[in-house]
């Protein structure tokens, strides 16, 4: 039976970039453990010699024609931005400058 | 007159518009009036654009007035679009706060094809956030209610599309089906819902939840209407690398052929795994009556065992969260959508975490973390890898079954519509709603749900699921159309027995109420 600790949930939340609250840590720890327990049996059903399926309808070598075609204009690309500056996305600092 | 127009099928409406017995504008106005009258109670729509819809309808009328042929068999017919398809002229929220008010810079291929076909898009429908859920209660904008009983859920994730069709607000809608999000809402609202073969309908501009499973498809009140819509939206699209480069199966022709009511020589398999614990007796009784009707139509019915289907639900709850955790990484508050905590002192990473925490609801967070776990080093093979092997077993079971039968049938969902709030606090109980629909998503083949009468337990709609092999969607349409004719002949069309909603009460709860739960 998989067990999942509160610390482990906090780690997952950090990896997933979710600033979860203390209450959520408790809630998700119990719920994730419950869900994982119920799905754990998949690890017993299929033998390793069964090939995995990643796509239901297999297509191989899907290429588009190597021809130029227009993409979004700068204005379209920026149309949903929270903040822009000089025609670019303005984002919070990405390095620790303090 | 105007209320009467809303009771007609899409095929009938198109016939009258194209014969110029009525106009697309008149039809559109009738449906807009119906939305104004009942959507306060149902809350199927997140956004309605009456002006744009009337303009699109007027364009169809002008073209017909000039003597030009209609752009498609559905030109002039109103439709509701699930709010997960990109639309340049309407917000696209996916039922999430993280995309509140967001207007995409391009149209989805499905959106574009609808416009080119002259289909009149009235607005965008409510859904579980990012299509994760089975009740539409996970929408950040309040739940949709089931037109058959406003205290009950309309299923999910496409509860808005199904409820809009069931409540006669539109004759047609578009949904998406990752684990049953078209078929299960259709079952519990007494409508027809189709999940086409994976790759049959373009995913370009469909906001991704689980890319190897997501598939758009039609919702309607009749099998023929669903087929006509399927032919409008289906077909190869170079913009979707998983799109199948083959003609759309002849689904409208199959629906018309099926309506002749003859299934002689058709082999139907009843999946023995889809009954037992967790299935309501009234659902199983309605299903058994449906199967005997198929026999009366001449079908040869046998029982078929697909043992791997018992493992479909757990495999799905590893594969779909894994893909979701990766797909939803794009919602980072940097280029579009919500941004929280940008106070010029916090770093991009801190802002990202605060944005995602505030923008996503509990089910989405749960699945992102579940997927993050299942994909982590040390667990990958035990969970994700094994789930993909189960997927192979399910494909093999389907292949073996389709050597013996032409289609498989089952109840679409184990229960009728449940009450609002009943499963919100219990994710596992919610997940069981999709028990019968998930194997088809994992295998990638086609399936639909067609109304199979009312449960004698509670008087609520039950769906009959018809499953066909990949690229043989037409088989499911043929069987469903034959069954629909027989059932209508015996009991009358189910859709017309929905309660009159215009006198109803119950305003939707406020956003604050829902978010605060």
Image (cartoon, rainbow, N blue to C red):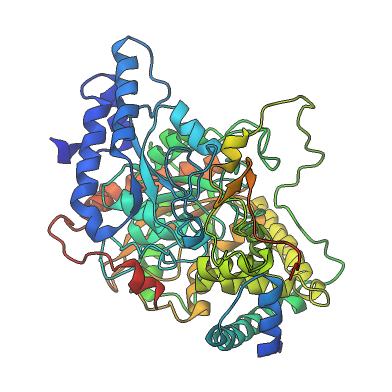
Q: Is residue B19 left or right of residue B236?
A: left
Q: Quadrant of residue A14 in the image? A: bottom right
Q: Nearer the viewer, residue A71 or B123?
A: A71
Give the number of callouts: 0
Residue pictured at 76% horizontal, 58% vertical: A53
Q: Is residue B309 visible?
A: no
Residue pictured at 21% horizontal, 24% vertical: B22
Q: Nearer the viewer, residue B369 or B456?
A: B369
Q: Is residue B56 left or right of residue A43?
A: left
The N terminus of chain B, quarter of image? top left
In the image, residue B475 lies at what x, y percent?
53, 42
In the image, residue A30 lies at what x, y percent?
59, 88
Q: Is residue B420 left or right of residue B335?
A: left
Residue pictured at 36% horizontal, 44% vertical: B123
Residue pictured at 61% horizontal, 80% vertical: A35
In the image, residue B516 lies at what x, y percent?
39, 76
């Amino acid at each position: 039976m998989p067990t999942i600790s509160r610390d482990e949930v906090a780690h997952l939340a950090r990896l997933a970039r979710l600033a979860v609250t203390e209450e959520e840590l408790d809630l998700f720890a119990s719920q994730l453990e419950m869900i994982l327990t119920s799905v754990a049996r998949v690890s017993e059903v299929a033998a390793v010699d069964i090939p995995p399926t990643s796509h239901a309808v297999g297509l191989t070598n899907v290429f588009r024609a190597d021809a130029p075609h227009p993409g979004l204009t700068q204005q379209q690309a920026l149309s949903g931005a929270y903040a822009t500056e000089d025609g670019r996305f303005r984002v919070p600092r990405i390095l620790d400058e303090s | 007159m105007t209320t009467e127009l809303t009771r007609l099928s899409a095929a009938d409406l198109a016939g009258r518009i194209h014969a110029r017995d009525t106009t697309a504008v008149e039809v559109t106005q009738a449906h807009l009036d119906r939305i104004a009258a009942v959507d306060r109670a149902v809350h199927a729509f997140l956004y309605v654009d009456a002006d744009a819809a009337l303009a699109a309808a007027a364009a169809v009328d002008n073209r017909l007035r000039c003597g030009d042929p209609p752009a498609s068999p559905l030109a002039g017919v109103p439709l509701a679009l699930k709010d997960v398809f990109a639309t340049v002229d309407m917000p696209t929220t996916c039922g999430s706060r993280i995309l509140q008010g967001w207007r995409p810079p391009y149209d989805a291929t499905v959106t574009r094809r609808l416009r080119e076909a002259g289909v009149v898009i009235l607005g965008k429908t409510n859904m579980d956030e990012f299509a994760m859920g089975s009740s539409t209660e996970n929408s950040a904008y309040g739940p949709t209610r089931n037109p058959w009983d406003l205290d009950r859920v309309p299923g999910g994730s496409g509860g808005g599309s199904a409820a809009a069709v069931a409540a006669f607000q539109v004759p047609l809608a578009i949904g998406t089906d990752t684990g049953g999000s078209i078929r299960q809402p259709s079952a519990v609202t007494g409508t027809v819902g189709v999940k086409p073969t994976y790759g049959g309908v373009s995913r370009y501009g469909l906001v991704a939840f689980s890319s190897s499973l997501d598939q758009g498809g039609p919702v309607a009140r009749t099998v023929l209407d669903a087929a006509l819509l399927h032919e409008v939206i289906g077909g190869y699209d170079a913009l979707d690398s998983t799109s199948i480069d083959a003609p759309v199966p002849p689904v409208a022709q199959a629906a018309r052929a099926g309506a002749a009511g003859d299934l002689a020589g058709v082999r139907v398999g009843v999946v023995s795994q889809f009954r037992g614990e967790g299935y309501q007796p009234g659902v199983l009784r309605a299903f058994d009556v449906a199967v005997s009707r198929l026999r009366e139509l001449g079908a040869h019915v046998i029982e078929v065992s697909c043992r791997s289907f018992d493992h479909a639900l757990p495999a799905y709850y590893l594969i779909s969260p894994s893909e979701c955790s990766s797909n939803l990484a794009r919602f980072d508050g940097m280029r579009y959508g919500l941004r929280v905590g940008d106070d010029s002192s916090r770093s991009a990473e801190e802002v990202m975490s605060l944005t995602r925490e505030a923008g996503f609801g509990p089910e989405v967070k749960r699945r992102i973390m579940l997927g993050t776990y299942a994909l982590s080093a040390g667990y990958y093979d035990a969970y994700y890898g094994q789930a993909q092997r189960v997927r192979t077993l399910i494909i093999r079971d389907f292949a073996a079954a389709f050597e013996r039968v032409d289609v498989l049938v089952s109840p679409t969902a184990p229960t009728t519509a449940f009450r609002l709030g009943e499963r919100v606090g219990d994710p596992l109980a919610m997940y069981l709603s999709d028990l019968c629909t998930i194997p088809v998503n994992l295998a990638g083949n086609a399936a639909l749900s067609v109304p199979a009468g009312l449960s004698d337990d509670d008087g609520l709609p039950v769906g009959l699921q018809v499953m066909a092999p990949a690229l043989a969607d037409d088989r499911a349409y043929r069987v469903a159309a034959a069954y629909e004719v027989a059932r209508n002949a015996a009991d009358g069309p189910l859709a017309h027995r929905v309660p009159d909603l215009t006198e109803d009460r119950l305003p939707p709860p406020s956003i604050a109420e829902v978010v605060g739960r």
